[in-house]
Image (tube, rainbow, N blue to C red):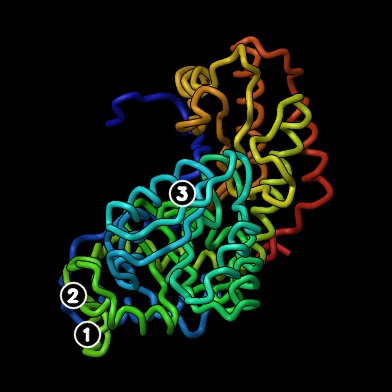
Amino acid sequence: MDYFNAPGRNHLFVPGPVNIPDQIIRAMNRNNEDYRSPAIPALTKTLLEDVKKIFKTTTGIPFLIPTTGTGAWESALTNTLSPGDRIVSFLIGQFSLLWIDQQQRLKFNVDVVESDWGQGAKLDVLESKIASDTAHTIKAICIVHNETATGVTNNLAKVRQILDSYQHPALLIVDGVSSICALDFRMDEWGVDVAITGSQKALSLPTGIGIVVAGPRAIEASKTAKSLRVFFDWKDYLKFYQLGTYWPYTPSIHLLYGLRAALDLVFEEGLENVIARHNRLGTATRLAVEAWGLKNCTQKEEWHSDTVTAVVVPSYIDSAEIVRRAWKRYNLSLGLGLNKVAGKVFRIGHLGYLNELQLLGCLAGVEMILQDVGYPVKLGSGVAAASAYFKNTIPLIPSRI
């Protein structure tokens, strides 16, 4: 029984956790079973093979850790680095801030490069640091691909280009929690050494699997890294991979079946079609924001995110009231502004197993809420802008042609 029941379905438009498709819910609706039976290793083997496809890697080794994105962060760091190692990390919003806090608490020497919230990573500063680091004291570059708090996407190909141009051996460690399987992500092509994501984002699962994929250089680094690790130790996983049983401890069996269903949905639609769909959703949301006369928190088009849009409100409006009104009156869940942008922005998540008509319902709800809180928006303006764009861009559904 819901504690706060309401008619119909909750319209979930936060940038994670996201809507769970019925196919995934049905796949997880099963009894417990013995993970030491032949069934779970057979399932796990297919999952490990197929997860590599959404990261676009043939050389990476996946780890499906029963944890959140925060645990995946810790796994990526502690398996590849030693206390005192110098790392360059970019602070561009709340989640990169939290990752930097974790890096510092794990006793790494963190060289923080800070941008105004709404801007991307300062890659010119990175280039300067790499160019001057002829002794190769920098051991890793840590960057959030898509900062969920501000709707900013960083250029990972440019980061790799900088490292390669100076032949710098620093590991490239990427938080792809709100990007992988929704935005263009190319682990092998961009030379990403460790990438992570979370099950509750683009894969549209419940929270509970932190997916870490480690490339060959990261696996090699893990052999000498001195950071203390137990639960997150890749060595334990690799031992059981070789044995063919795969699990050093009890996995979340229901989430594994859910992940199988999630990957099947991605491959049925086609990964490139999934990415294109998210681009349509992001573009339409930005057109609606423009039609409302409001501004995007993201300050340049090159940084626009196709999984979340942070909308700046006028100074006389508290954005938290928009989020409260959405939930209390319209059964619509929007994202709060966090930390430096608290009260200044609200966030529309357009991420996961979501289509264009669902997004139009959200945009219609936002327009009513904006009027409720005293902003003079014309009802239908944003919906019309998004609809006009969708009318010319939505393809036929492949399975129904």
Report the quarter where the N terminus lies.
Answer: top left
- Residue 81, image x and y in percent? 33, 70
**Residue that badge 1 annotates:** 239
Earlier sequence position, callout 3 versus callout 1: 3
Residue 248, disc: 2
- Residue 41, image x and y in percent? 26, 80
* Residue at image point 68% right, 47% down: 304
* Residue at image point 35% right, 48% down: 101
Label 1 sits on a secondary structure element that is helix
- On the picture, is 319 further left or further right than 10? right
Q: Nearer the viewer, mark 3 or mark 1?
A: 3
Residue 333 seen in the figure: no
Label 3 sits on a secondary structure element that is helix
Q: CA distance from mark 2 to mark 1?
A: 8 Å
Q: CA distance from mark 3 to mark 1?
A: 32 Å
**Residues at marks 3 and 2 touching, judged by CB atoms closer than 8 Å:** no
Given residues 395 and 369, the one toward you in this image is: 369
Q: Nearer the viewer, mark 3 or mark 2?
A: 3
Residue 16, disc: none
- On the picture, is 218 further left or further right than 143? left
Q: Amino acid at mark 3?
A: Ser
- On the picture, is 93 further left or further right than 277? left
Image: 3 above or below 386 = above
Q: Label 3 neighbourhood size at 10 Å, few (<14), some (14-19), many (20+)?
A: many
Q: CA distance from mark 3 to mark 2?
A: 30 Å
**Residue that badge 3 annotates:** 96
Given residues 25 and 86, the one toward you in this image is: 86
* Residue at image point 34% right, 24% down: 4
* Residue at image point 82% right, 39% down: 388
**Residues at marks 2 and 1 touching, judged by CB atoms closer than 8 Å:** yes
In this rendering, the count of numbered labels is: 3
